[in-house]
Amino acid sequence: MPRVVTFHYTLLNPGGRVIDTSSGGDPITYLEGAGQIIDGLDARLRAVPAGTRIRVPVPAAEAYGMPDPAQVQKVKRALLPVTGELEVGAQFQAGEDRYAPVVTVVAIEGDEVTLDANHPLAGVDLTFEVEVVSTRPATPDELGHGHAHGADGTGHCQ
Ligand code: ZN
């Protein structure tokens, strides 16, 4: 029976630098196995009870995947939706759509710009420091919808 799990996390890169944290904000609530958090973390938290603090290493392949060379492409600078200076390392959305992928400038040669559309964390082994705040059985509604309805099950649909 899938659970609904509420947790706080701090995400560290292999050098131990904090990439992201829920500390100081709201904890994250998800339905197990529903793809609401990265698979490698979901799988490793399955049997973990509320009240537990645990360090969870997640290899890149089970986090944001490995970089795909096909996602690195050269384009003409004039075609980019960017005005002003461009520099290596700059990131921007590849299109107008708010769900358009974020691309990173990896090289600039004359009027050609090399863009990498891989997730910035692709290929990066991650470590999550997790505090499981609460767990409960999923409700039939949540199982039907494929997502959690908040920490107590009375929240609105996401
Ligand atoms: Zn729902």
Image (cartoon, rainbow, N blue to C red):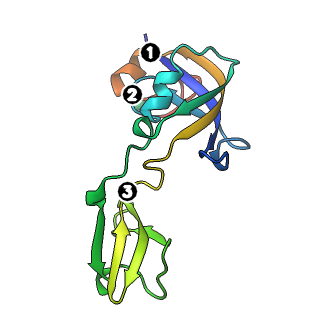
Residue at mark 1: 2
Mark 2 vs mark 3: which is more N-terminal? 2
Q: Relative to the observer, which residue lies in front, 70 or 146?
A: 70
Q: Relative to the observer, which residue lies in front, 99 or 10?
A: 10
Query: Can you tell me which quadrant of the image ligand 1 is in?
Result: top left
Q: Are marks 2 and 1 in contact (CB under 8 Å)?
A: yes
**Label 1 neighbour load within 10 Å: few <14, some 14-19, many 20+:** some
* Residue 149 visible in the snapshot: no
How far across and down, in percent of the image, does residue 123 sit? 44, 48
Query: Residue at (64%, 48%) from the top-left corner?
Result: 15
* Residue 155 visible in the snapshot: yes
Q: CA distance from mark 2 to mark 1?
A: 9 Å
Q: CA distance from mark 2 to mark 3?
A: 23 Å
Query: Residue at (48%, 76%) from the top-left corner?
Result: 88
Please state, as top left, top right, bottom left or bottom right, where the C terminus lies in the image.
top left
Residue that protrudes farthest toward the left in the picture: 70
How far across and down, in percent of the image, does residue 48 sit? 59, 16
Q: Relative to the observer, which residue lies in front, 144 or 103?
A: 103
Q: CA distance from mark 3 to mark 1?
A: 31 Å
Q: Is residue 4 shown left or right of residue 17?
A: left
Amino acid marked by disc 3: Asn
Circle number at residue 34: 2
Query: Residue at (49%, 34%) from the top-left corner?
Result: 156
Q: Relative to the observer, which residue lies in front, 103 or 34?
A: 103
Amino acid marked by disc 2: Ala
Residue at mark 3: 118
Task: Give the label, 3 or 1, closer to the camera.
Answer: 3
Is 72 drawn above or below residue 138 in the view shown? below
